[in-house]
Image: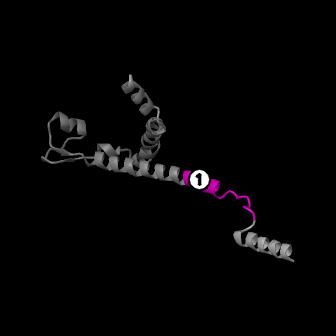
């Protein structure tokens, strides 16, 4: 029974619960950022590329001239799909930027909490010692 009890206490530690929460929130955050990339950013990039999707960019390596990646794959042509690489780089930059903005905002809220005015602690050590000295002098007189 000790093994099960130890395992249960391990699972209920704050670090494990926080990690599980972070993984779940991270998954949801990934969906938001993926939607931002696929539904907002990439259509704008496609507009710049005159309607062509970035992931459809490729170069045939064997001299063939297929119109699409699907046609090249069907013909077993050797192709370099550099568009997929560009897409991955764009995704990475956007995810990094969104996380940067999120953390920047989080740090601002943290600083505001730290900058809250602190109540005065009272007289300093020097002031207390001076007061004690003066009181001792009055008692001796």
Task: Name above or below for residue 22 compared with residue 104.
Answer: above
Closer to the camera in the image, 106 or 137 = 137
Q: Is residue 70 visible?
A: yes
Q: Quarter holding the C terminus? A: bottom right
Task: Name above or below for residue 9 compared with residue 92.
Answer: above
Q: Is residue 49 visible?
A: no
Q: Is residue 66 left or right of residue 105?
A: left
Q: Is residue 135 left or right of residue 68?
A: right
Q: Which residues are magenta?
A: 105-122
Closer to the camera in the image, 27 or 137 = 137
Question: Residue 110, percent across and down?
Answer: 59, 53
Q: Quadrant of residue 16?
A: top left
Q: Is residue 59 magenta?
A: no
Question: Residue 18, percent across and down?
Answer: 48, 38
- The residue sitting at 41% across, 45% down in the picture is 42
Question: Label 1: which residue?
Answer: 110
């Amino acid at each position: 029974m000790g093994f099960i009890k130890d395992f249960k206490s391990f699972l209920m530690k704050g670090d494990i619960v926080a990690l599980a929460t972070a993984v779940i929130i991270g998954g949801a955050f990934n969906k938001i950022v993926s939607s931002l990339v696929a539904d907002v950013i990439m259509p704008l990039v496609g507009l710049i590329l005159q309607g062509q999707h970035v992931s459809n960019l490729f170069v045939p390596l064997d001299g063939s001239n297929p119109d699409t990646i699907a046609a090249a794959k069907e013909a077993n042509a050797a192709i370099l799909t550099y568009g997929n690489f560009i897409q991955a780089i764009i995704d990475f930059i956007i995810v990094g930027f969104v996380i940067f903005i999120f953390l920047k905002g989080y740090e601002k809220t943290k600083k505001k909490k730290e900058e809250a005015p602190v109540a005065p602690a009272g007289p300093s050590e020097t002031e207390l010692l001076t007061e004690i000295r003066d009181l001792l002098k009055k008692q001796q007189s």
